[in-house]
Amino acid sequence: MNYAAWSPVYERILGDFGFDPKADERARDRLAANVDPFDERRLDRIDGATVAIAGAGPSLADETGVAAGADVVVAASAAAETLAQAGVGVDLMVTDLDKTPDTARGLTREGVPVAVHAHGDNRDAVEEWVPRLAGEHVLPTTQAEPRGPVVNYGGFTDGDRAAFLADAFGAASLRFPGWDFDDPSVSPAKRRKLMWAERLLCWLERRRDDRFAVLDGRRGGIDPL
């Protein structure tokens, strides 16, 4: 995903949520000041692999076997904790540090890469937590234009960003344990973000000429990008 392809979608997200792109850029620049470039060769094993994109929804507890059966496991935020409790290791965590920063810290201390995302609402978390992570294991990302060591593979929420990242590194197939688009327990703001995650996954599967099982029975109700 190059930025030219992502930018029009990003503009639509900004407009829908009323986000300030300058705030995203300030957070990106703050992240850039605290990290070095990540060695992307460390994610070469994604190329040609079956990758589980583990969401943090309540269904994950019953679907950890899907993750365990994949070649590579990418965990969205708190999904890393649920998988760890089930004895399933992760190969990459994707997070904006809003829920489980201690988990991100522990994984980097163990040598597991963590894709840390900077956006306008989490600059304080970036400033607090990124210096506490093992820096060589931090993959810095942004939803704004990439700059310096901070990259942009596409995506908006932790979960769909994980899918876009796996696609960028050549994943052969994607599985989606722990995805609950209709979770009644989430806030209205989170529900809107899940709607965008759904739209973005639909866009991604079209770009891949693929069909994600997690979208089966839902495509007719998704506003296309």
Image (cartoon, rainbow, N blue to C red):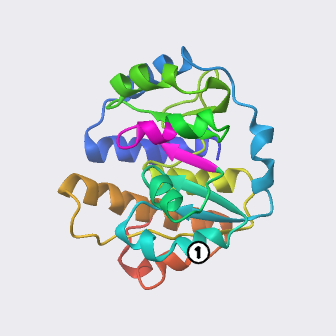
Residue 96 horizontal/vertical position (percent): 43, 39
Is residue 87 rendered to the left or right of residue 39?
Answer: left
What's the magenta region?
A: 92-104
Circle 1 residue: 66
Residue 112 sits in quarter: top right
Asked whether 85 or 203 is in front, the reply is 85
Quick check: is 98 in the magenta stretch?
yes
Quick check: is 70 in the magenta stretch?
no
Residue drawn at point x = 64 percent, y = 40 percent = 113
- The answer to whether any part of residue 96 appears in the image is no
Residue drawn at point x = 44 percent, y = 37 percent = 102
Residue 28 horizontal/vertical position (percent): 48, 24
Residue 146 sits in quarter: top right
Residue drawn at point x = 38 percent, y = 47 percent = 12
- The answer to whether any part of residue 166 appears in the image is yes
Residue 174 sits in quarter: bottom right
Residue 98 horizontal/vertical position (percent): 35, 39
- Seen as rendered, the residue at the extreme top is 33
Residue 80 horizontal/vertical position (percent): 50, 53
Is residue 107 rendered to the left or right of residue 188?
Answer: right
Q: Which amino acid does label 1 sit on?
A: Val
Residue drawn at point x = 50 percent, y = 23 percent = 132
Is residue 33 rendered to the left or right of residue 137?
Answer: left
